[in-house]
Image (spheres, rainbow, N blue to C red):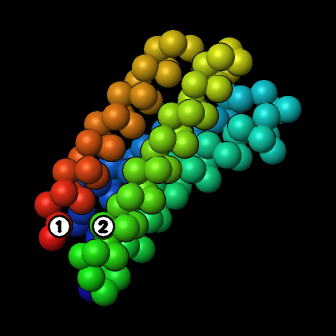
C-alpha cells in the first residue's frame, strides 16, 4: 500500500529538485547557514509538501489551492537562486540549471492545476 500522490510526476520531480537544491546549498558560505541556505531549503521542500498535502485533501478546489502554494514556493526558490548568484555562491551554470528545472516544474504544476475543475 502506498500514498497515491507518489504517482504524481510533479511530486516526484519536486522531490528530486529538492535534493539538488539541498546539495547546492551545502556549498554556500557558513555565514549563510541561518539565512539563505535555510530559506532555500525550506522553500524547495515546501513544493513537494504542498503537492502531497493538497492531493490528499477533500476536493479538487483544495488541491488547486495547494498547487498554488507549491507554485509560490518555486518563485521563492528562484529568488533565493538569484540571491545566491548575485552573492557569488553559485556559478551561472548552476543557476541556469536550477532555474530551468524550476521553470519546467512550475509549468507542469500550472498545467495540472488547470486540468482540475
| Vertical position of residue 84 compared to residue 49: above or below | above
Q: Quadrant of the C terminus?
A: bottom left
Foreground: 52 or 61? 61
* Image location (x, y in percent) of residue 28: 71, 29
Q: Residue furthest right?
A: 31
First reached walking from the N terminus: tag 2 or tag 1:
2
* Image location (x, y in percent) of residue 20: 49, 39
Quarter holding residue 6? bottom left
Q: Residue drawn at (19%, 51%), measured in percent from left and top?
A: 111
Q: Quadrant of the N terminus?
A: bottom left
Quarter holding residue 113? bottom left
Q: Which residue is mark 2?
A: 64
The answer to whether residue 2 is seen in the rendering is no
| Vertical position of residue 52 compared to residue 39: above or below | below
Q: Which residue is mark 1?
A: 116
Judged left or right of residue 44, residue 89 is: right
* Image location (x, y in percent) of residue 10: 28, 54
Q: Residues within 10 Å of mark 1 (few under 14, many from 20)?
A: few
Per the image, label 2 sits on a secondary structure element best described as helix
Foreground: 67 or 92? 67
Per the image, label 1 sits on a secondary structure element best described as loop
Foreground: 11 or 103? 103
Q: Residue drawn at (42%, 28%), measured in percent from left and top?
A: 99
Judged left or right of residue 30, residue 103 is: left
Q: Residue drawn at (31%, 72%), measured in percent from left and top?
A: 63
| Vertical position of residue 96 compared to residue 63: above or below | above
* Image location (x, y in percent) of residue 50: 44, 65
Circle number at residue 32: none
Amino acid at each position: 500500500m502506498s500514498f497515491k500522490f507518489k504517482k504524481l510526476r510533479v511530486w516526484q520531480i519536486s522531490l528530486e529538485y529538492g535534493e539538488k537544491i539541498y546539495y547546492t546549498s551545502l556549498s554556500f558560505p557558513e555565514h549563510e547557514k541561518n539565512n539563505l541556505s535555510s530559506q532555500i531549503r525550506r522553500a524547495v521542500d515546501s513544493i513537494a509538501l504542498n503537492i502531497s498535502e493538497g492531493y490528499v485533501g477533500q476536493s479538487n478546489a483544495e488541491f488547486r489551492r495547494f498547487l498554488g502554494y507549491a507554485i509560490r514556493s518555486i518563485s521563492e526558490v528562484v529568488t533565493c537562486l538569484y540571491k545566491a548568484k548575485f552573492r557569488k555562491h553559485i556559478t551561472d551554470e548552476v543557476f541556469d540549471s536550477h532555474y530551468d528545472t524550476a521553470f519546467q516544474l512550475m509549468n507542469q504544476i500550472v498545467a495540472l492545476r488547470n486540468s482540475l475543475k
